[in-house]
Amino acid sequence: MATALAFVAVHCLFFLTWTIQRRTPMAVKNWFDLRNDYSLPSWFGFLCLSAAGIACLRWGQRSGRRGILTTGVLFLFLTVDDLLMLHERIGGLFAESLSRTGTYAWVLVLVIPLCLSGLVAAWSCWSALAGDRPARRMLFGGFACLGTSMVIEAFEQKVTHSGLRWRELDLVLYTQVVEETLEMVGPLLVAWAAAEAWRRTPQRPRRAPRTMAAAAAVLVAAPQEQEQEVGCGV
């Protein structure tokens, strides 16, 4: 969490303060730009999503709940999606037809499946945390952060063209900081909740693997037991 907040602080210094912004080379600022798809904060965001996915997978394996396993797969898919920018590519197929809506095309195309999958994932994890209020609060906060970030991004184009400014800077520069911060903090909270749940979930007993010798002994003993039972009956 501290790393995420440190990246946010550095971004604000480089892009929301006039003095430091003018004196810092653009090449340096790009490395810490939250909006850059392959900056240091972006790579940290990939790790946050991966951590949430791995934590949910481990929790799902230990608890035996398929919904939690599916949640882990969902977060890993979102990691790949961000790395390869799949949602932007899908939205690009509809960009021309949806250009007048004032919202990114990918948001309009994918909002329903993303919301439904997010709600199902959140409910699967929430229902498995009955009686664990701290973990539930973290889980709720994580999914709330992710949902809020999507809402902010859905209105980003309208905010960009609104002409609203604060401290002589466009308002969208501030909303982008909030959005990118939530996208890092959200998965971290989910990962924390899943890791705590995994730690507190008892390990399911596993059946000991039966060796070939043990299996042969069982097969040999079975007819002898049947003969003894017949002899006793006579």
Image: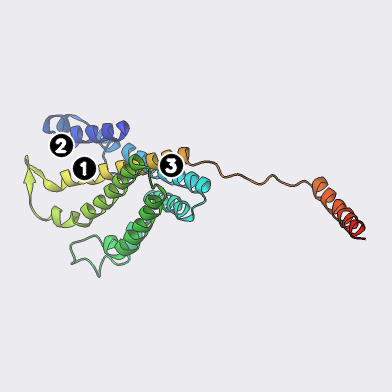
User: Which one is in front, 134 or 56?
Assistant: 134
Q: Residue at 22% of width from left, 57% of height from top?
A: 154
Q: Amino acid at mark 3?
A: Ala
Find out whether the residues at labels 3 and 1 contact each other: C-beta distance under 8 Å.
Answer: no
The reply, left or right, for residue 5 in relation to residue 233 is: left
Neighbours of disc 2 within 10 Å: few (<14), some (14-19), many (20+): some
Q: Residue at 49% of width from left, 44% of height from top?
A: 58
Find out whether the residues at labels 1 and 2 contact each other: C-beta distance under 8 Å.
Answer: yes
Neighbours of disc 3 within 10 Å: few (<14), some (14-19), many (20+): many
The reply, left or right, for residue 141 in relation to residue 207 is: left
Identify the residue under disc 1.
Answer: 177
Question: How far separated are the C-alphas under marks 3 and 1?
Answer: 31 Å
Total label count?
3
Identify the residue under disc 3.
Answer: 197
Q: Amino acid at mark 1?
A: Val
Question: How far separated are the C-alphas under marks 2 and 3?
Answer: 39 Å
Q: Which mark is residue 16?
A: 2
Image location (x, y in percent) of residue 150: 26, 53
